[in-house]
Image: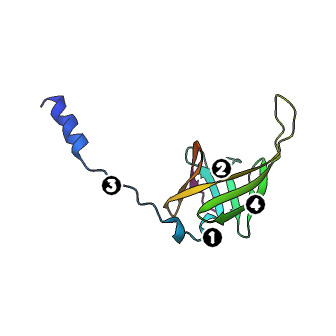
Amino acid sequence: MDWRYFLFAVLAVPIAPVAVQDVSEIDPGYFEGRWALLDESCEAPTNWTMIGGGNFVSEDLVGTWIWLDGKLVLSLDDLAIDEETGEAGGRFRMDGPVSVVDSNRFDFTIEPDIYQLKRCPE
């Protein structure tokens, strides 16, 4: 069999699209828990922990989170000291739309970046 026919057969197989939940249906409680970037281990200290009531904790970040008008809003303090300059981190805000992939995965868009997060077991 010619390789071109095989390639066509592979490309002709339909791929099921990932169902993304409508953001108007998302309950803020969905975000509670520990989250890691998709390519990181859940054991890494850089995981995000979003606590019910709005507190946010990570290795070098503390602050608050809120689900507001279809956007996840993080107001954070960076506790890390810059290794090159010796300067302390500062306060910053991250807010952007969310696409829920499933009960254990969501994408958080902060243009131009997309943070792909997975739920970590408790």
Gap between marks 2 and 4 measured at Cα: 22 Å
Is residue 38 left or right of 86 when viewed as pictured? Answer: left
Q: Position of residue 79 (x, y in %)?
A: 83, 46
User: What kind of residue is marked 3?
Assistant: Ala
For disc 2, the neighbor class at 10 Å (few under 14, some 14 to 19, many from 20) is few
Dot 4 falls on a residue whose secondary structure is: strand
Outermost front residue? 69
Tag 3 residue: 16
Q: Nearer the viewer, mark 2 or mark 4?
A: 4
Dot 1 falls on a residue whose secondary structure is: helix
The label number, if any, that marks residue 29 in the structure image: 1
Tag 4 residue: 64
Answer with mark 2 or mark 1, whichever residue precedes in sequence.
1
Answer with mark 3 or mark 4, whichever residue precedes in sequence.
3
Answer with mark 4 or mark 1, whichever residue precedes in sequence.
1
Residues under numbered marks 2 and 1 in contact, where contact means CB atoms less than 8 Å apart: no
Residues under numbered marks 2 and 3 in contact, where contact means CB atoms less than 8 Å apart: no
The stretch in magenta equals 116-122
Q: Position of residue 56 (x, y in %)?
A: 74, 59
For disc 3, the neighbor class at 10 Å (few under 14, some 14 to 19, many from 20) is few
